[in-house]
Structures are given as C-alpha cells and as structure tokens.
Image (spheres, grey):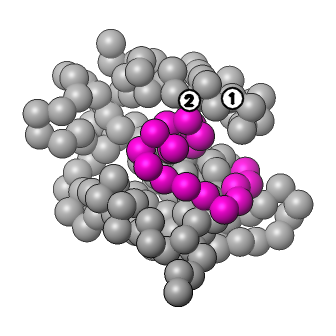
C-alpha cells in the first residue's frame, strides 16, 4: 500500500500545469515557506541542455539566517518518488532531505526538499525566460512581494 509523502516545489514544478504535464499527481497542496533559505539560479543544466549562462533553480542559506523563500508543498503518494528523483537528477545532480517548512497558518510541516549537489553549482548564472514564464503563470501561489522580487530577476536570454 502506498504511503503519503510531502514534497516542496520551488522550481518549475510550482506551476501546477507543468507539474501535471510531467505526469505528477497530488492529493493536496498548500503554499509554504522555508525559513533562512533563498532561491538562487546557480544549478548547472545537464550537459547539452540549456543555453549559455543559464542557471536552474536551487536553494541556498541566506547570509544572516534571515528571510525566507516560498514554494508549494505537494502531498502525494510515494509511488511518485522515483519519478521525482529522476526529474531532479537525484542523486547525481541533486540531493534531497526532509526539512521543516512553515504553513501559512503558522504550523510546521515536514517535506522532502531537493537541492543541487555542490559540484553542480556555477557562478553568474541566470534563469531562462521560459522558466520565468512558468513562474509568472504561478503568481497566484505566491505573495505579491515574493512574486515581484522573483520577476525582477534578470534572465540569460
């Protein structure tokens, strides 16, 4: 029998249409925050993929442990875990761990979080316009301030 898992999406999977297009299904979803972390676009694309200067979404600690990043917590069946691992390139491209996240009613939830392996991080990378378009279509899932800051991110193309 399948167990339920919770997965934190802060990348293109935050876009529900894209999430479903990739073959994922969720039982429930809720917007959450991850404290003392921020979204950065420093993950290297796979060899032969992406465009010059492109960085994929990743998580890194904030310099002073202040701030937070937003994302979507999907409750789903564990049968999707191998597919999630494949999507994120676990364990070669990304690592995963269970972290505490904050729901908007101020209770803590735990979820699986994927982040880039140290050797898959580059410097001076930027997201693509295509990625930012997926984020733009997900604006209803984010606070206005977070969305505005995300949309001010320069792209590589």
Residue 150: which quarter of the image?
A: top right
Please state if 69 lies on the left or on the right of 124 as rendered: right
Identity of the residue furthest to the top in this view: 157
Please state if 40 lies on the left or on the right of 3 as rendered: left
Residues under labels 2 and 1: Cα distance?
A: 7 Å
Q: Which mark is residue 74?
A: none
Please state if 25 lies on the left or on the right of 45 as rendered: right
Q: Which residue is mark 2?
A: 135
The percent position of residue 124, horizontal first and vertical second, equals 30, 30
As displayed, is residue 35 above or below residue 152?
A: below
Quick one: quadrant of the C terminus? top left
The percent position of residue 65, horizontal first and vertical second, equals 62, 58
Callout count: 2
Assess disc 1: are there few (<14), some (14-19) or many (≥20) residues with their C-alpha within 10 Å of its C-alpha: some
Q: Is residue 31 magenta?
A: yes
Q: What's the magenta region?
A: 14-34
Residue ID at (41%, 21%): 130
Residue 48: which quarter of the image?
A: top left
The percent position of residue 133, horizontal first and vertical second, equals 51, 21
Please tell me whether mark 2 sits on a helix, a strand or a loop.
helix
The percent position of residue 86, horizontal first and vertical second, equals 29, 59
CB atoms at circles 2 and 1 under 8 Å apart?
yes
Can the viewer see residue 64 in this picture? no
Residue ID at (59%, 40%): 16
As displayed, is residue 71 above or below residue 48?
A: below
Residue ID at (27%, 48%): 121
Residue ID at (61%, 25%): 137
Can the viewer see residue 133 in this picture? yes
Q: Which residue is mark 1?
A: 139
């Amino acid at each position: 029998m399948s167990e339920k898992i919770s997965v934190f999406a802060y990348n293109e999977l935050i876009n529900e249409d894209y999430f479903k297009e990739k073959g994922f299904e969720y039982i429930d979803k809720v917007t959450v925050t991850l404290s003392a972390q921020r979204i950065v676009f420093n993950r290297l694309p796979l060899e032969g993929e992406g465009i010059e200067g492109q960085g994929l979404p990743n998580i890194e600690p904030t310099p002073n442990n202040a701030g937070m990043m937003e994302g979507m917590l999907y409750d789903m069946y564990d049968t999707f875990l191998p597919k999630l691992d494949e999507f994120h390139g676990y364990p070669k491209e990304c690592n995963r761990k269970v972290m505490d996240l904050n729901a908007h009613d101020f209770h803590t939830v735990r979820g699986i979080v994927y982040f880039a392996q140290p050797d898959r991080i580059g410097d001076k990378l930027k997201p693509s316009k295509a990625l930012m378009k997926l984020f733009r279509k997900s604006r209803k899932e984010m606070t206005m301030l977070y969305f505005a800051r995300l949309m001010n991110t320069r792209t590589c193309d």
